[in-house]
Image (spheres, rainbow, N blue to C red):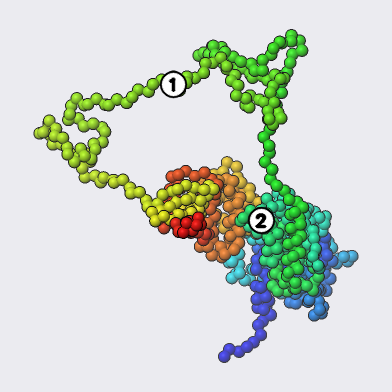
Amino acid sequence: MPLIQQLPSHLADMIAAGEVVERPASVVKELLENAIDAGASAVSAELRGGGMSLIRISDNGCGIAPAELPTAFLRHATSKLRTEEDLSCIGTLGFRGEALAAIAAVSRIEITSRRRGAARGACMTLEGGAAGAVEECGCPEGTTISVHNLFFNTPARMKFMKKDSAEASAAAAVVQHEALSHARISFKLTRDGAEQLYTPGDGKLLSAIYSALGREFALSLLPVEGSGGSVAVEGFVTRSLQGRGTRAMQHFFVNGRYVKSPLLSAALEEAYRNQIMKGKFPGCVLHLSLPLDTVDVNVHPAKTVVKFLNERAVFDAVYYAVKSALEQGREYPVAPAPSVRPTPPPPTDPTAPPKQNTPCYQTMTAQEFRAQAAPGKPLTSFSVRQSAAAPVSEWGGAVTVSDSIQPVLKNIPPPPAATERMPVPAPQEAPAPENAAVRPLVPTPRETLAHPTPSPAADTPQTDPLAGQERLEPAAEPPWRIAGEVLRTYIIAEDSQGTVWLIDKHAAHERVNFDRMKRNAEPIMGQQLLTPEAVTLSADECAVLLEHLDLLNQFGFEAEDFGDSTILCRTCPAEIDAGDIAPALEEIAGQLLGAGRADPASARDVMLHTMACKAAIKAGMVSDERELRVLVDKVQKGEIQFCPHGRPVKVKLSRYELEKMFKRA
C-alpha cells in the first residue's frame, strides 16, 4: 500500500490555485474585490495579451503596511475574519485569504503599496509563490499589483486558454459586474493601451449602467424600488417591449456581491408573465439588501452562488417590486393616426391684378398636352395649385391632390368602354403542309405514334424521333389535399381516410432548412454587407462569440471584435435578412454559453438551429400555394416529424373527433 505523506507546500499551492484561478478573469475578480474591500474610491484595471501577459490592478485604498506584505501572500491569511461568528455574517467580498497565494503560485507578481498618511511605500516581487525581499519605494497611496506571465509554470492549464480577445472580454465582464455593484467607485478598464470602460463613480446606479452596459440598454429601463419584510430591492428592469433573446442581461447583486441565482431569475420572469413576448427574456440590474445572517455566500469557490435562509421572502420581494414597477411604467404601442398635411398656397405677387373665379385646380387640354409632348420639343412643367376654398377631409386637414380623384386632364376623352374594345381575332388552324413528308413541329399524339400513316415516299425509311426515349407518365395525385391555411401559420390538409392534419409551416420549413444544412458539408455562402452591422451584447455573450469566430465564419458570419462588448459583422449568411443579424447572434451566444461551449458538435448544432430558424418562413407571412404544397408533401411522406427544437410539426384530428365536437357521434 502506498505511504500517506503530506504534499509539498508549493504543490499544495498550485492545486489550490487550480480551484481559485481558472483564467485571467478569475485573477481580475479577486484583485478587484480586494481593492473594494480596502475602501478604494477609484480602481483601474489594465490588461495586455488578454490578461495572459499582464494584469495590473491599482486602487487608492487603505494600502498594506511593509511588514504585512509577505504575510498577505500566505495561504489563509486575511484581515476580514477573526472568529467563528464572523463566518456567519460575511459583509466583505473576500474573506478566505486564498486569492493572493493562489495567484502568486502560477505567475510572477510585483506589488507596491503605501498606507494612507505614510511617507513612503514598499514593494516586493514574487515568482511561482516564492517571495523576494521587501524594499522601500516611492508610490501613491493605495496598492498596485502587477501579474505577469500567468500560468508560466503550469503549461497544462495554459493550453486550455482561449484567444486573447475572448479572455479579455471575459475579464471585461468581471469589471462590468463590479462597476454595477459599486456605483460609488470609479472603475477604469484599459485593454492593450486603449480605454474600454470608465464609470464616473458618482453613486448613481443609472450612470454606472450607462457606462458599463451602453446607452441603448440604459434608455430601456424602468426604476424599481420596494421591500418585503427584511428584504429591500432596488435597481432597474427593462420595459416589457424591450425583451431580449437570452438572460445574459440579467444582473443580480446581493449585499453588493454579483450572484447567479435561478430563484431570482424565476421571480423576475414571473413578474413579466403575460407582459412580454414568448421566447423573450427581461433584463435587469437589481440590488438586494438583506441581513448578513440570512444569506450564505460560502457555498462556492467563485462566490457567485449564494443560499437564502428564507427563499420565499426573497422571491416575493423581487416579484412584487418588479410587478409594481411594470404597472406604473406600463406603455402601450400606439399606431399613429393617418394625417393629411395641407399644401401651403403658392406665394402671391402683390403687384399682380386680382383674379376672378380662380379655379380650384389648373387644368390643361389634351391638345395642349400633346403639343408639348411632340417629338423634339421639351415638355414644360405644370403645377397643380390648391385654392383657399379647398375641401376638408374627414381627418381635419385640407385635401391634397393625392386624396382627390378629380381628374386634372379633364378634357382628355375617357378610354373606350368594355363593349367598344377592339375584337380579338379568333385563332385559325395552321395550313396543312404542302409536302406530306415534312413532319410538323407540333409533337405527334401518342395515338398517331401507335398507328402511323404511311408516307408516299415508301422507299425512304421513316424513323420515330421519340423511339427509344422514356415517356414520362403524369404523376399520380397524392392521397391528400390542401384544404387551406388559417392564421397565416397553420396549413389544413386532409387525406383519403378523412383525417384532418394541422401543419405548422414555420416548424416544417425550419426542419427542412436544418436537414439541408446538416447534410451540406460545404461552408454556407455569405453576403457582404454594404454597411457593417455593429451588435452590442453582454460581456459574456461577446466573449463566447469571440471564442467561436472560426465557427461563425463557417456559417457565413464574418465578424470581429469592435470593443466595448460589441461585435462588428461584415458578412452574414445569404439566407438571413440583415435585420435578423443581431437577434441571431444573441441567440447563438446564449446557446453557446450552455452545452455548446464544450462540445464542438453541439456548437455546430447550435449554429444550425439558429440559422434554420431565422431562414424559415415566419408565422404570419403570406406563403405561395406551391411552397405550402412542398411542405405538406414532406410532412405527409414522413420526412419531417419534429422541428430541430423538438416541437411537433403536425397535429392529427380524426373524423370521429370532429364529429364528436359537433355532437354527431
Residue contact between numbered discs 2 and 1, judged by CB atoms under 8 Å = no
Relative side of 129 to 590, left or right: right
Of label 2 and label 1, which has the lower sequence position? 2
Pointer 1 residue: 419
Return the residue nearer the eye: 536 or 334. 334
> Outermost residue toward the bottom?
1
Image coordinates of residue 494 in percent, x first then y, are: 43, 52
Q: Amino acid at mark 1?
A: Thr
In terms of depth relative to the viewer, which is nearer, 333 or 498?
A: 498
* 327 sits left or right of 6 in the view: right
Q: Quadrant of residue 460?
A: top left
Measuring from the top left, give residue 654's x and y in whole percent: 45, 58
Amino acid residing under circle 2:
Asn
Q: Secondary structure at mark 1?
A: helix
Residue at point 67%, 41% (across, down): 335
Could you tell me residue 198's position as x and y percent? 76, 54
